[in-house]
Amino acid sequence: MMTSKKILLSATTIVISMLLLFSSCKKKEDNTLVDENGQASTDSRQAISENDASINDITQTLSDYPLMHGRMSSPQKIATTICGLDIDTVGAYTGTIKLNYNGTVCNNRKREGSVRLTIINYASGQRWKMAGCVLKVEYLAYKITRASDGKNIELNGTQMLTNISGGTWFDLLFLGQANLSSSVTGTNLNVKFNGTATAIYNINRRFTYTWANNILTCTGEGIGSSSGLSNLENYGTTRDGDAFTSQVLSPIIWNSTCGWGAPLSGHLTIKVASKSFDLDCVFGVNASGTPVIVGSNQCAYGWNLTWTVGSTSQHKVIAY
């Protein structure tokens, strides 16, 4: 009889302990739900947006410099129209130029550092206008500071930019080419936030640019794979050292009216290893978080971040 009582007591103790553990875990998850700030998604989106802006500078510069573009009969150097940018063309005859940012504040952004561009197999005749041409992009302490509050992001590392479609901005804007398509791939891009915390990003995206009614539109897709997932635009480790993936469910679309930092539409989900829930991100929403369709000269309010624990969901609308 005593043995049976001991067994019953032991079993009861185990059940109570499990219930307490479940309650503790649930309470922790509930607290996480309340406290979630979306830092991983905000960081990734900021890095992607600044990477997009950089790629725009790069492709425009390549179009403007004949020795890189492929118009060999034109002058080597022409004036750039990109604010805050000085271009070193000393190595242009061997397929290398350097973008030096001089710290001028342009549209609330101060940019410093450099980006070195090298066409792979330049000596063999490769030029940026050719389909399949590959460009090595090296970020050298490339730092972007928001002038309004001093917050900054710095990129260091290497990416490879490939001209998929062939052609350049000149062909798209003036010669009627239907679109321009390129991809950016790379591993272990160091992204430092505010001079302290550093994330490691593997950005893998495909861009398709179109031009209509004097508006440039860019469609961004994820082409990376990791942890059994595909269509990833980014993956790696967050500023807190947690593994994460960012999977594109529908392309991220922005245009020249609103800029690379304010997508008109798009949907992605971010999985962070330390979280028991996903971060669902929908771009192009109003102040209430509802997706909107904007006119040609209008822009959306921001993007909607949603996360769900158990049967409870919460969301946060983040303004552009």
Image (cartoon, rainbow, N blue to C red):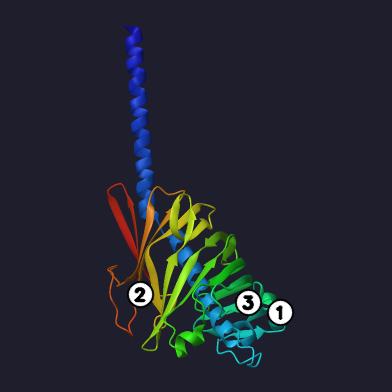
In this rendering, position of residue 255 left or right of residue 110 = left
Q: Residues within 10 Å of mark 1 (few under 14, many from 20)?
A: some
CA neighbours of label 2 inside 10 A, class few (<14), some (14 to 19), many (20+): many
- The residues bearing labels 2 and 3 have C-alpha atoms spaced at a distance of 35 Å
154 relative to 38 in the view: left or right: right
Q: Nearer the viewer, mark 3 or mark 1?
A: 3
Mark 2 vs 3, N-terminal side: 3
Residue that label 3 marks:
126
Q: On screen, 211 above or below 160?
A: below
Query: Which mark is first along the chain, 1 or 2?
Result: 1
Q: Secondary structure at mark 1?
A: helix
Residue under pointer 2: 264
Q: What quarter of the picture does the C terminus occupy?
A: bottom left
What is the three-letter code of the residue carrying label 2? Leu
Instruction: Residue 244: give x, y in percent of width and height.
Output: 48, 54
- Percent from the top left, x then y, of residue 176? 43, 87
Q: Are marks 3 and 1 in contact (CB under 8 Å)?
A: no
Residue matched to label 1? 94
Q: Nearer the viewer, residue 62 or 104?
A: 62
